[in-house]
Amino acid sequence: MIGGAVGKRYATALHELAAEKGAADAVGKDLASLRAAWETSEDLRNVVRNPQFGAEAKRNVVSALTDRLGCHTIVKNAMRLLADRGRLEHLPSIVEAYERIAEARAGRIRAEVVTAKALPEPYYQQLVARLAQATGKDVVLVRREDPSLIGGVVTTVGGRVFDGSLKHRLAGLRAQLLASTDPALAAER
């Protein structure tokens, strides 16, 4: 939970500064690029997490990375600050919090859709339209696949979870069967 609080604090300050400079979208794109680099580069994560590398070495690594990616000055300075303060490991939570702040301020809401496998594009389009109608906001759809769901869809919107997965339905059916046959077995689940 501490990582989320740290991420939110830095993201809020970063978004306020970026909005003040008229660069909120550019900063958001740069942060997304940095998160992609973080997720795909085990070497980057190892340098950040390895105590043998001091703040200066980490600062040099992020400076080189932000230069290579052509990041906005605000992002470059923020990454150097994170390196100096030993907070680079919080980069994913900072980016996540920044995106949520930017979406909220732009009147958008994030919806996460988890399916067992990718569904046809028209399904996602229809879902976005219905969610937009229900929430009165523009919807940013985040898609994920989780084969353990077996089938169906789990949708999360604004902290509410709508679980229509086959896995969830089977678990409910199992609980009902156990409860109806032997109360002692129901307590074991």
Image (tube, rainbow, N blue to C red):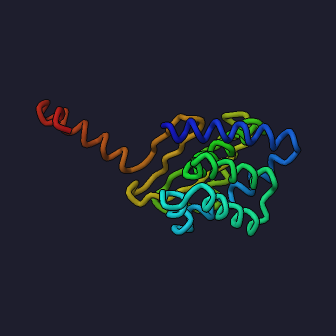
The reply, left or right, for residue 133 in relation to residue 49 is right
Instruction: Give the mark count.
Output: 0
Residue 10 in the image, given as x and y percentages of width and height: 66, 40
- The C terminus appears in which quarter of the rendering? top left
Residue at 73% over, 62% down = 66
Vertical order, 104 against 78 (above or below):
above
Which quarter of the picture shows residue 178? top left
**Which percent across, then down, holds residue 15?**
75, 41
The answer, for residue 122, to whether it is visible in the render is: yes
Looking at the picture, tell me which residue is in the foreground, 90 or 124: 90
Report whether residue 130 is seen.
Answer: no
Q: Residue at x 68, y 41 (%)?
A: 11
Pinpoint residue 96: horizontal percent, then vertical percent.
62, 47
Q: Nearer the viewer, residue 143 or 176?
A: 143
Residue at 30% across, 44% down: 171
Of residue 105 and residue 89, the one placed in the foreground of this image is: 89
Horizontal side, residue 112 vs residue 151: left or right: right
Name, please, the residue furthest toward the right.
22
